[in-house]
């Protein structure tokens, strides 16, 4: 195992994604904040605000280490109690201005925990997913075909497994509804050993821009009005609810003493809530909820 190789890849991925997002935005530039964690480690948060395409875009690299894991980690894996840990990853959240362009999230990460006299416990995780406000089937098919291609070198069963995992994870249990149309999600991944698991993480990271940016290019100039904007803000509220109530990464970051501003960069700059709101039957908004967000085989 070589944590330095993983770190080098993650830093390069952050650079590559920021360059790609700036290019398609056409005017926005990422602000860079370098931060340190008192308990050990730190990171680099890059934020683009009020760009030509992205109302908010965040690409965060973090590498933290410490003597003790937070309760959210040991509850999930009790055998980690009493171990030193090292966790690193790149997290991406993109909130476009145009409601016809989906919000999207990606993350790739590596974790290792060690204790003298015992074997290291390590795993990789990550994925990417899509949260549309209006349903375009060609966009969904493209996104999932690229996701399938990212998994193809690792076995025919990997994409269906990671797709199902994503559908189940990004689900608002208190609303009984999906957050979006899924994509890929995996955690605690050690299949095939370190080299194979690292290769899967790299493939997911490398396929994210090809999965998402063609959709941005296709939809970014679509005309919209106040109705579409208000629907986007309302659905962004669901995104906020998931991240603050259910997301394990958010909880781990806050409990491990991570930088709050960097952890919460996933939240949209504006969102809205309307009491007991139900779209008019037959509208594009109603179709999104009734049909488009239901898990299906997009490929």
Image: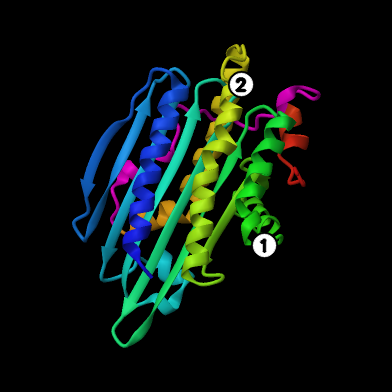
Q: Secondary structure at mark 1?
A: loop
The residue at 67%/55% (across/down) is: 159
Instruction: Please provide the residue range marked out in magenta.
Output: 257-285
Percent x, y for residue 153? Answer: 63, 57
Relative to 4, residue 78 above or below: below
* Residue, disc 2: 219
Helix, strand or loop status at disc 2: helix
User: Going from the N terminus, do you reach mark 2 or mark 1 first?
Assistant: 1
Q: Taking 151 as reference, is 237 left or right?
A: left
Q: Residues within 10 Å of mark 1 (few under 14, many from 20)?
A: few
Quadrant in which the N terminus is drawn: bottom left
Task: Name, please, the residue furthest toward the right.
Answer: 282
Q: Determine which quarter of the picture holds residue 165.
A: bottom right
- The vertical placement of 233 against 52, above or below, is below
Q: How many marks?
A: 2
Towards the viewer: 115 or 268: 115
Q: Which mark is residue 155?
A: 1
Residue at mark 2 to residue at mark 1: CA–CA distance: 33 Å
Residue 141 is situated, as x and y percent measured from the top left of the image, at 72, 37
List x then y, in percent, for residue 162. Answer: 63, 56
Task: Tell me what residue is drawn at x 44 percent, y 29 percent.
Answer: 21
Quadrant where the C terminus is found in the figure: top right
* Cβ atoms at labels 2 and 1 below 8 Å apart: no
- In this view, the mark in front (2 or 1): 1
Q: Position of residue 174 (x, y in %)?
A: 61, 49
Q: Is residue 276 magenta-colored?
A: yes
| Residue found 39% across the figure and 34% down from its top | 18
- Residue 171 visible in the current orientation: no
Q: Residue furthest bottom?
A: 117
């Amino acid at each position: 195992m070589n944590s330095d190789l993983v770190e080098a890849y993650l830093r390069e991925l952050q650079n590559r994604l920021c360059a790609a997002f700036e290019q398609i935005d056409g005017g926005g530039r990422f602000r860079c904040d370098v931060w340190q964690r008192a308990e050990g480690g730190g990171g680099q948060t890059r934020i683009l605000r009020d760009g030509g395409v992205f109302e908010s875009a965040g690409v965060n690299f973090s590498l933290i280490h410490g003597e003790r894991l937070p309760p959210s980690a040991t509850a999930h894996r009790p055998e980690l109690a009493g171990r030193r840990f090292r966790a690193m990853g790149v997290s991406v959240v993109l909130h476009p201005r145009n409601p016809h362009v989906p919000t999207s999230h990606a993350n790739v990460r590596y974790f290792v925990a060690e204790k003298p006299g015992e074997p290291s416990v390590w795993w990789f995780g990550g994925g990417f997913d899509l949260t549309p406000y209006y349903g375009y089937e060609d966009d969904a098919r493209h996104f999932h075909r690229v996701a399938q291609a990212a998994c193809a070198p690792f076995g025919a069963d990997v994409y269906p497994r990671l797709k199902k995992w994503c559908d189940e994870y990004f689900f608002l249990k208190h609303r009984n509804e999906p957050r979006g149309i899924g994509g890929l999600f995996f955690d605690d991944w050690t299949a095939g050993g370190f080299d194979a698991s690292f290769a899967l993480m790299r493939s997911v990271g490398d396929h994210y821009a090809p999965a998402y940016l063609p959709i941005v290019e296709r939809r970014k100039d679509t005309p919209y009005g106040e109705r579409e904007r208000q629907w986007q803000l309302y659905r962004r509220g669901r995104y906020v609810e998931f991240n603050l109530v259910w997301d394990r990464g958010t909880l781990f970051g806050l409990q491990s003493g991570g930088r709050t501003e960097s952890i919460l960069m996933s939240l949209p700059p504006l969102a809205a809530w309307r009491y007991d709101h139900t779209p008019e039957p037959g509208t594009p908004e109603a179709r999104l909820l009734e049909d488009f967000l239901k898990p299906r085989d997009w490929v």
